[in-house]
Image (tube, grey):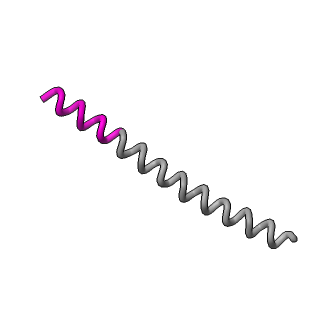
Amino acid sequence: MIKKLLLAFGVTSIALTAAACNTVKGVGKDIESVGNAGENAID
């Protein structure tokens, strides 16, 4: 029972870490695009 619980916890942790990584990359791309748009507007 404990092994199954630890395995489920490990799989969940890996899945959440992967999802968070993708979210951070998406936010970074959004911020970069806003910066580029602002830079183009100033020029």
Q: Where does the N terminus fall, quadrant-wise?
A: bottom right
Residue at the left extreme, as displayed: 43
Residue 20 drawn at (x, y percent): 54, 51
Residue 2 drawn at (x, y percent): 85, 69
Q: Is residue 37 magenta?
A: yes
Image-based side of 18 in relation to 42, left or right: right
Image point (24%, 30%), residue name: 38
Image-based side of 41 in relation to 33, left or right: left
Residue 11 drawn at (x, y percent): 67, 65
Image point (42%, 50%), residue name: 25
Image-based side of 42 in relation to 2, left or right: left
Q: Is residue 26 magenta?
A: no
Residue at the right extreme, as displayed: 1
State the predominant SS element of the stretch in magenta.
helix
Residue 19 against residue 43 in the figure, above or below: below
Image point (74%, 65%), residue name: 8
Residue 22 drawn at (x, y percent): 47, 53
Q: Which residues are magenta?
A: 31-43
Residue 40 against residue 24 in the figure, above or below: above
- Residue 37 location, quadrant: top left
